[in-house]
Amino acid sequence: MSRPGPLSLPVLAGAALVSSPALWRALQGTGAPGVALTRFLVCLVLCWLALSVVATLVGPPPRPGSAAADHGPGSGMGRLDHEMHPAGRLGEHDPGHHRDDAENADRSQ
């Protein structure tokens, strides 16, 4: 997400949405147009600041193809042990899954 400018569509739409009650009253003639304009400009600045902070926290989007490179060996995103060995039925014992235990038992004798 790139940092929005003060006159970008999301900023203008957010300011219009937040200040819409004052704008509506000004259009109906029950509110002062100067107050509505002032509220819209204050909302414009606040929306611009808020969206800029969000854009800074989110950062730029990842480059295409970089996700595959990030999940290589040693990245911590490999397959888990339980994903590599299929689960058996309840009560079944998979002798290949506990090879280390069998080797340790042979060494202790």
Image: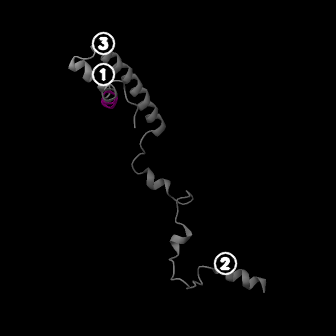
Which residue bears the numbered disc 1? 22
> Does label 3 or label 1 sit earlier along the sequence?
1
Residue at 56% over, 70% down: 81
Q: Give the amino acid at mark 3.
A: Gly
Q: Residue 100 carries which label?
A: 2
Residue 81 to residue 12: above or below = below
Q: Residue 34, labelled with which disc?
A: 3
x and y, in percent, of residue 42 in the image: 38, 20
- Write the residue at 54% across / 71% down: 82
Q: Gap between marks 2 and 3, in whole Å?
A: 79 Å
Amino acid, disc 1: Ala
Which one is in front, 16 or 89?
16
Disc 2 to disc 1, C-alpha distance: 73 Å
The residue type indicated by label 2 comes to Asp
- Determine the residue located farthest toward the right in the rendered image: 109
Q: Residue at x 51, y 81 (%)?
A: 88
Q: In which quarter of the image is the N terminus?
A: top left
Occupied quadrant, residue 31: top left
Looking at the image, which residue is at 49% across and 53% down?
A: 70
Say what secondary structure mark 3 lies in. helix
Image coords of residue 96 (percent x, y): 59, 82
Q: Which of pointers 2 and 1 lies earlier in the amino acid sequence?
A: 1
Q: Report helix, strand or loop for mark 1.
A: helix
Look at the numbered discs 2 and 3 and tell me whether their residues touch, using CB distance below 8 Å.
no
Residue 77 or residue 56, whichever sits in front: 56
Residues in magenta? Answer: 9-14
